[in-house]
Image (cartoon, rainbow, N blue to C red):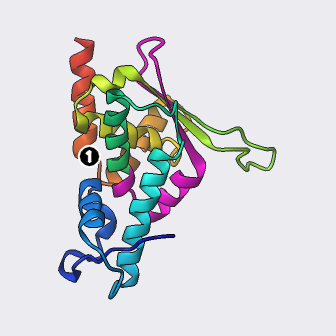
């Protein structure tokens, strides 16, 4: 059974998909009735419920509760709440997440699903985040997650083109500030 909650119309607008996860959470917790909800408001509540289902429902491996997992869940929830709806729908159905111990200097890796001869995907992309990334400030972690998700939506012919396209896509989604924080964190870690 789905529960819907009322958001006052003055806070609802065309940019509802850019609400932060915290705003979605506060909205969900403080409103009690679905009476008077318009279509956008119902979509907003569906988005929140889908994010909770993704984060708590086994889409992130391993399914363990810990302080590092809470930090990752909060950052992933923030990214998911701000993606365009069409992109969110694809992430929901086509990307899985793994949070794993570090095995080197790598922070994260997007592993695309193999392609069939007709160029259709034979599964979902898997994004692996190594726990070293959890040392980042929350904004840098949000930037890293947005960057890795963008790898599933932009592919270049070589590494440099691929990275440029991925950064452009994540900035298009509204994660410019967080990507700048990510770059600063990576530079600080390298020095």
Q: Quadrant of residue 39?
A: bottom left
Q: Residue at x 50, y 46 (%)?
A: 154
Q: Position of residue 49 (x, y in %)?
A: 43, 61
Magenta part of the chain: 80-109
Label tally: 1
Q: Is residue 88 above or below residue 165?
A: below
Q: Residue at x 26, y 30 (%)?
A: 183
Q: Is residue 67 shown in magenta?
A: no
- Camera-side residue of 57 and 119: 57
**Is residue 155 visible to us here?**
no
Q: Position of residue 9 (x, y in %)?
A: 23, 82
Residue 135 left/right relative to 47:
left
**Is residue 6 visible to us here?**
yes
Q: Position of residue 181 (x, y in %)?
A: 22, 34
Q: Secondary structure at mark 1?
A: helix
Q: Quadrant of residue 73?
A: top left
Residue hosting label 1: 176
Q: Residue at x 29, y 61 (%)?
A: 24
Residue 154 left/right relative to 69:
right
Q: Is residue 60 above or below residue 50?
A: above
- Camera-side residue of 60 and 86: 60
- Is the C terminus in the top left, top right, bottom left or bottom right quadrant? top left
Q: Is residue 86 shown in magenta?
A: yes
- Pick out the residue farthest to the right: 117
- Pick out the residue farthest to the bottom: 36
- Camera-side residue of 106 and 100: 100
Residue 57 left/right relative to 65:
right
Q: Quadrant of residue 44?
A: bottom left
Residue density around tag 1, few if under 14, some if 14–19, many if 20 or more, within 10 Å: some
């Amino acid at each position: 059974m789905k529960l819907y909650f009322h958001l006052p119309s003055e806070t609802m607008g065309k940019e509802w998909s850019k609400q932060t996860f915290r705003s979605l959470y506060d909205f969900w917790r403080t409103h009690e009735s679905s009476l008077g909800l318009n279509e956008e408001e119902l979509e907003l509540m569906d988005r929140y419920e889908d994010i909770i289902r993704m984060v708590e429902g086994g889409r992130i491996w391993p399914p363990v509760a810990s302080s590092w997992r809470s930090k990752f869940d909060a950052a992933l929830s923030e990214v998911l709440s701000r993606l365009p709806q069409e992109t969110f729908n694809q992430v929901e159905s086509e990307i899985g997440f793994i949070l794993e111990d570090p095995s080197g200097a790598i922070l994260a890796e997007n592993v695309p699903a193999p392609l069939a001869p007709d160029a259709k995907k034979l599964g979902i992309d898997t994004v692996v985040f190594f726990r070293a990334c959890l040392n980042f400030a929350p904004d840098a972690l949000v930037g890293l997650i947005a960057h890795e998700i963008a790898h599933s939506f932009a592919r270049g012919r070589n590494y440099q083109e691929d990275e440029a396209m991925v950064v452009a896509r994540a900035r298009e989604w509204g994660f410019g500030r967080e990507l700048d924080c990510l770059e600063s964190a990576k530079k600080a870690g390298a020095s």
